[in-house]
Image (cartoon, rainbow, N blue to C red):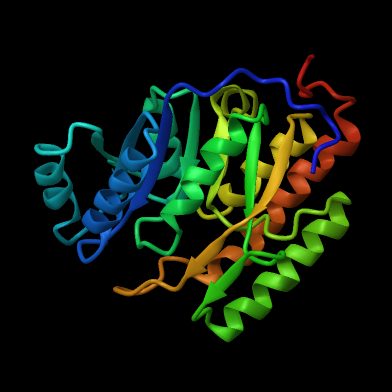
């Protein structure tokens, strides 16, 4: 956890950004279940679902759902496509003073979004979930991906000398001030999941880690292609490592 004392103002509106590509089997239930959970806890929110070049009925279904769910804003990432580009498209349109990035396949637990909201309102700039700390957990995680995940996160912990052990997980929360302070965001693909938290840490924003749970997707294939991502993750890690040790704090948050 950051050694900075929490001091940020309460969050008034939470934006949840959900990138979706060919998720016709689950994106609507993801949005609906999330909305119900947040409404039950009286959390003011908007849900931004970004269609990232789907070839199925994802966009059609989102538009239909938005007609009866005013908190939903469907957007199209017209291209070029990529997970990171879709998330950035959503962040560019958010109206909230904090955002949660969430997957469209119901792998993330809606109850953890509520806990992110509560932790942000303790005054933290960022909240990072960990599936691999006491109280967290994973269900049906493919073994090969699990091994590669733990190796990648161990490498990041050593490289940056941080205690966060689930940096690569996309499911995290950031205040708007953090998102703006981390721009420009340059990762077009899943490496954005590493760029955002590492930049936030390196640039001096306060953060807290809480346990979260994750369940493997129930429908459709995973969009993360491990063979394509190794060099991209390494590039962004080294890019931010160079900033940490050689930028002379040019990009660090000014208190």
Q: Is residue 125 above or below residue 52?
A: above
Question: Whole-percent x and y of residue 147?
Answer: 67, 80
> Which residue of the protein is positioned furthest toward the top in this rendering?
255
Question: Whole-percent x and y of residue 225?
Answer: 49, 70
150 relative position to 221: left or right: right
Q: Is residue 227 above or below residue 249?
A: below
Residue 185 seen by the camera: no
Determine the image quadrant of residue 86: top left
Determine the image quadrant of residue 6: top right
Q: Nearer the viewer, residue 144 or 119?
A: 119
Question: Whole-percent x and y of residue 163?
Answer: 82, 54
119 relative position to 46: left or right: right
Identify the residue at horizontal 32%, vertical 43% (top origin): 79
The quadrant of the image that shows the C terminus is: top right
44 relative position to 174: left or right: left
- What count of labels does the image hold? 0
The quadrant of the image that shows the N terminus is: top right
Identify the residue at horizontal 68%, vertical 55% (top origin): 167
Identify the residue at horizontal 60%, vertical 33% (top origin): 120
Q: Which of 73 and 120 is in front in this view?
A: 120
């Amino acid at each position: 956890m950051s050694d900075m004392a929490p001091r940020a103002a309460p969050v008034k509106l939470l934006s949840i950004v959900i990138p979706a590509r060919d998720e016709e089997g689950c994106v609507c239930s993801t949005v609906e279940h999330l909305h119900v959970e947040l409404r039950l806890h009286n959390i003011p929110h908007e849900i931004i679902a970004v269609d990232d070049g789907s070839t199925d009925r994802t966009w059609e279904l989102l538009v239909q759902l938005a007609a009866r769910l005013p908190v939903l804003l469907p957007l199209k990432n017209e291209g070029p496509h990529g997970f990171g580009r879709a998330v950035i498209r959503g962040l560019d349109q958010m109206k909230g003073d904090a955002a949660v990035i969430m997957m469209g396949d119901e792998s993330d637990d809606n109850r953890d979004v509520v806990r992110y909201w509560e932790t942000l309102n303790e005054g933290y700039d960022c909240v990072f979930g960990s599936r691999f700390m006491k109280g967290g957990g994973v269900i049906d995680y493919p073994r090969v991906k699990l091994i590669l995940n733990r190796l990648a996160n161990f490498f990041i912990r050593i490289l940056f000398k941080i205690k966060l052990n689930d940096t690569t997980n996309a499911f995290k929360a950031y205040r708007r001030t953090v998102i703006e302070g981390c721009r420009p965001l340059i990762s077009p693909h899943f490496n954005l999941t590493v760029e955002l938290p590492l930049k936030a840490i390196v640039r001096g924003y306060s953060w807290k880690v809480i346990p979260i749970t994750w369940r493997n997707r129930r429908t459709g294939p995973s969009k993360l292609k491990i063979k394509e991502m190794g060099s991209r993750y390494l590039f962004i890690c080294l890019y931010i490592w160079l900033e940490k040790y050689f930028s002379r704090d040019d990009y660090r948050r000014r208190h």
